Each structure stands twice: as C-alpha cells, then as structure tokens.
Image (tube, rainbow, N blue to C red):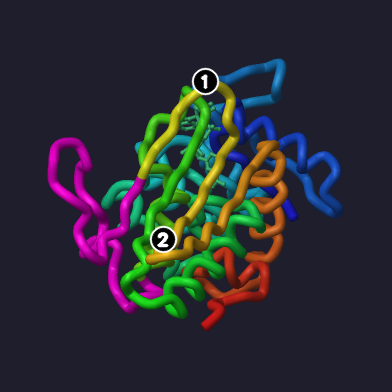
Amino acid sequence: MRVVVVGAAGRMGVAIRAALQVWPQAKLVGAIDRLPSEQQGITTDLEAVLPGANVMIDFSSPQSTAKTLAAAARHGVAALVGTTGLGSEALAAAHAAAVKVPLIIAANTSLGVTLLQELVRAAAQALPADFDIEIIEGHHRHKKDAPSGTALALGRAAAAGRGQTLESTMAGDRRGESARQAGEIGFAVVRGGDIVGEHTVLFAGAGERVAISHQATDRAIFARGALQAASWLLGRAPGRYEMSEVIGLKSIS
Ligand code: NAD
C-alpha cells in the first residue's frame, strides 16, 4: 500500500504516520499539509505525490476535501476521507470521484464505532417507537464541529433503523420551554479538556433504558481503522463503500 496523507501535520495526520510505520507492507509516499515542514518531510503539492500512490488518506478540513477528492480521482487513487463536517461541495466531489475510484467517507474510522453504528441501527429497529432516542457525545476543547460527525452518523443509523431520515427526526434547539417531541432524536454535546471521543446512544423507554456506548481513549484507533479501510479499498471497483463493509457487517437487520 502506497499512502498519501493529507493533513499530515495535524493530530490525526501524526497518528496515521505513526501507525503507518508498523503497518505491514505500507509505505508513506507523500505527507501533505497547508504549510511545508522540512523536519517532518511535509510538503504542500498533492498533485506531485499522487502519481506514486495507490491510496489517499484525508484528515484535513472540510474546506479542502472537495479539491483533494477531485485530485485523487484524476490520478486514479483510492480515497479514505476521515475529515468531518463536509459540506455540499465536498459531497458533490465525492459523488463525482466515486465514478472513477473506490472511496470511503467515514466520520469515524474506529472499528468499535463502526460496530456501534450497526448495533444502534438494530436496536432502533427492534425497540418500540415510544423509546426516546438521545445521543450524547463528548470531545476535546479544540473540536470545531458540533454535534460530532460520529454523533450525526449514529443519529442517521438510529433513524434508518426506524425507517426514517435524520433530517426529519433531529430535535431542534432544546433551550426554552417546549417539551420533547415524540419520535425526535436529540443530541447533547460536551466539549472539554483532552476527551478523545465519547458517544452514547440512549434508548429511554417507560421503566427501562438501554444505552450503547463507545469511548475512545487513544487517537491511534482512528488511525489503525483508517489504514485498515485504506488497504481494504485497494483493488476494489470504483464506488462508495462503508466502514461497516470493512468489518464485514454491511448492516445487521
Ligand atoms: P487538526 O486541526 O489537528 O489537523 C488538520 C490538519 O489539516 C492541519 O495540520 C491543517 O493544517 C491541515 N489542513 C487544513 N487544510 C488543509 C489543506 N487545504 N491542505 C492540506 N492540509 C490542510 O485536526 P485533526 O484533529 O487531525 O482532525 C482533522 C479532521 O479529521 C477533522 O475534520 C476531524 O473532525 C476529523 N477526525 C476524524 C476522525 C475519524 O475517525 N474519521 C477522527 C478524528 C478526527
């Protein structure tokens, strides 16, 4: 596996480059960020390194992903995008890129969270609709987007389990005096310190509660999951794939 890392100087970029050093048969062929860093071998020209790569791993910023995806597609390089908070431009670029290369966009590349997502879908499908669904997430004080991309993905999984979409079920702002609406999916966000990532999906019924949780204690889990997904993509036909396919669970139903 010949890997280009975009966002190489960031928290995740550093974790991925560390994980790559012990990943069997993997080689870093390009470390790209906004600013060059000679010490870390980081450069800024993605187009220059893509010809030597067979997979690009992007953990940068939502503003840059549309451009990096278009470049990967032009060079026939598979792509694993872990960047969260992607807007319509990046999603359109992903749609176009998936015609040319295999691609995964994953708000959370932890294999544990991938499993959590599938368990949430199954629980939402199995439990009666009068179980209220609430998603509680926590991250470090530097995180910019809220709720987290993972929390939204869990919300989508829960809504899908009920045959609905998150757009039609996501609770609005809870401040003020209005009571909880039946069937809505609520989100609560904690930001502070160095929390790596915590997610709980609560199914609260009358007389019982089910909580399904995941705690990340080390950023290395996202890096290892990203490398596993990147190697899984190699040799696949062009198209959009999911992390659940990487762990062999397309969808528990
Ligand atoms: P970070 O701010 O530490 O790193 C981002 C890096 O990307 C920075 O070094 C920045 O200079 C670089 N960058 C920004 N724009 C760029 C561009 N146009 N070209 C090249 N490099 C550019 O952030 P982080 O904690 O490493 O997270 C990065 C992204 O990954 C965020 O969107 C975050 O939410 C997401 N994330 C995803 C997962 C997952 O499992 N999918 C896990 C953790 C973080």
Q: Position of residue 244 (x, y in %)?
A: 58, 68
Give the residue drawn at x 48%, y 23%.
141
| Residue annotated with mark 1 | 35
Mark 2 burial class by Cα count in 10 Å: few <14, some 14-19, many 20+: some
Give the residue drawn at x 75%, y 55%.
1
Q: Secondary structure at mark 1?
A: loop
Q: Secondary structure at mark 2?
A: strand
Left or right: 242 in relation to 27: left
Magenta region: 160-187
Give the residue drawn at x 14%, y 37%.
176
Q: Amino acid at mark 2?
A: Ala
Left or right: 55 in relation to 75: right
Q: CA distance from mark 1 to mark 2?
A: 47 Å
Name the image quarter holding residue 20.
top right
Camera sees residue 96: no
Left or right: 146 in relation to 172: right
Q: Position of residue 88 (x, y in %)?
A: 27, 52
Residue 78 within the magenta-colored segment of the rendering: no
Q: Position of residue 146 (x, y in %)?
A: 36, 38
Q: Amino acid at mark 1?
A: Leu
Name the image quarter holding residue 207.
bottom left
Outermost residue, front direction?
A: 207
Q: Residue 204 bears which disc, if any?
A: 2
